[in-house]
Image (cartoon, helix red, strand yellow):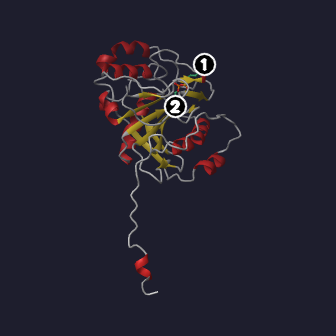
Amino acid sequence: ASNKSSEIPSAVNITLGPCPDNPPDLVGQLLIEFDFRRTWEYVRKEVSPSLQKGGRFKPKDCVAKQKVAIIIPFRNRHEHLKHWLYYLHPILKRQLVDYGVYVINQDGEGVFNRAKLMNVGYVEALKEYDYDCFLFSDVDLVPLNDRNLYRCFDNPRHLAIGMDKFKFNLPYKTFFGGVASFSKHQYLKINGFPNTYWGWGGEDDDIYKRIIFRRMQVSRPDLLTGRYRMIRHQRDEHNDPNPKNPDKLFQTRWTMNADGINSLKYTVKNIEKDILYTFITVDIGSPE
Ligand code: UDH
């Protein structure tokens, strides 16, 4: 009994190794269905274990190579958010990333502005944690394959290349909508996203142009890995196609230097920490 204490090491020093590039628990093709009977209680029970408040997760047996902020532009799509969280949390856990989910909720009933909300997400996420990768996702898009990795690559990455609504193909070659990731460096190189695309349309093409004008390329998964299911819905209120947006695209080369992360202005109204997500309500103003 006298030497019992010497059998117990005074400090257990376990150094975790880096997470593998090919996470071993991925399964490939997934069955995705948007069942209206799925409740919030059920989703919480299924996916909150191992999450930390605010929709945060870290692999427990290895050190993730990237810290990924997942940013969702949002207003009035709670039903979609429920399905998104139900499917994406388990996928992201299997992908072994150190991540947090930020839902950026546009306050009020003004005209929607997707790209500006995504800029807000970038700034707000960085206030919380030293993220080095930013992944922007629409709330109604769920990948059909967990090998479509939600992380950053050598070039800005477009992940949602094969949506079911476009018959699992790109609608056009330079399409950049839906889900995309940027390292901090790549994002800053293009001055973030435009703040001036109010209403539906154009902002994703502007972002594509920024990437090309800054001499980067777009990285993509293959067409099978890049399949997505979109939750069917009606057109939202206060997000009609804006006829001014297509013309703005002729100016991107010049406007991108002054319209972006360097000109972003907004006011945070509220921050709510749920176990499944961080919900940030912001006043982003209205078109000038
Ligand atoms: N979004 C909201 N609330 C809104 C508008 C947009 O949360 O009121 C977000 C949401 O993340 C959505 C994304 O912005 O997924 C893009 O919205 P969108 O309307 O530009 O794109 P989506 O593909 O719809 O969802 C296109 C119009 C569909 C009309 C279909 C008629 N059958």
> What residue sits 31% from the left and 22% below the top?
256
Q: Is residue 191 above or below residue 50?
A: above
Which of the two discs, 2 and 1, labels the residue nearer the N terminus? 2
* Left or right for 241, reference 121: right
Residue linked to disc 1? 167
* Quadrant including the C terminus: top left
Task: Identify which residue, 111 or 133, lies in the foreground.
Answer: 133
Measuring from the top left, give residue 280's x and y in whole percent: 46, 42
Q: CA distance from mark 2 to mark 1?
A: 18 Å
Task: Identify which residue, 239 or 52, lies in the foreground.
Answer: 52
Measuring from the top left, give residue 10's x and y in whole percent: 38, 73
Specify the label residue 3 is tagged with. Answer: none
How many numbered discs, if any? Answer: 2
Measuring from the top left, give residue 78's x and y in whole percent: 59, 38
Task: Identify which residue, 29 or 187, lies in the foreground.
Answer: 29
**Type of amino acid at the residue the image marks with label 2:** Asp
**Type of amino acid at the residue the image marks with label 1:** Lys
- Does residue 203 appear in this view? yes
SS state under label 1? loop
> What residue sits 51% from the left and 42% below the top?
92
> What residue sits 40% from the left and 35% below the top?
152
SS state under label 2? loop
Q: Nearer the viewer, mark 2 or mark 1?
A: 1
- Does residue 106 appear in this view? no
* Picture quarter with ligand 1: top right
Badge 2 vs badge 1, beta-carbon distance below 8 Å: no
Queried on whether the Cβ of the residue with tag 2 lies below 8 angstroms from ligand 1, the answer reads yes
Residue linked to disc 2? 138
Classify 10 Å Cα crowding around label 2: few (below 14), some (14-19), many (20 and above). Answer: many
**Image quadrant where residue 30 sits:** top right
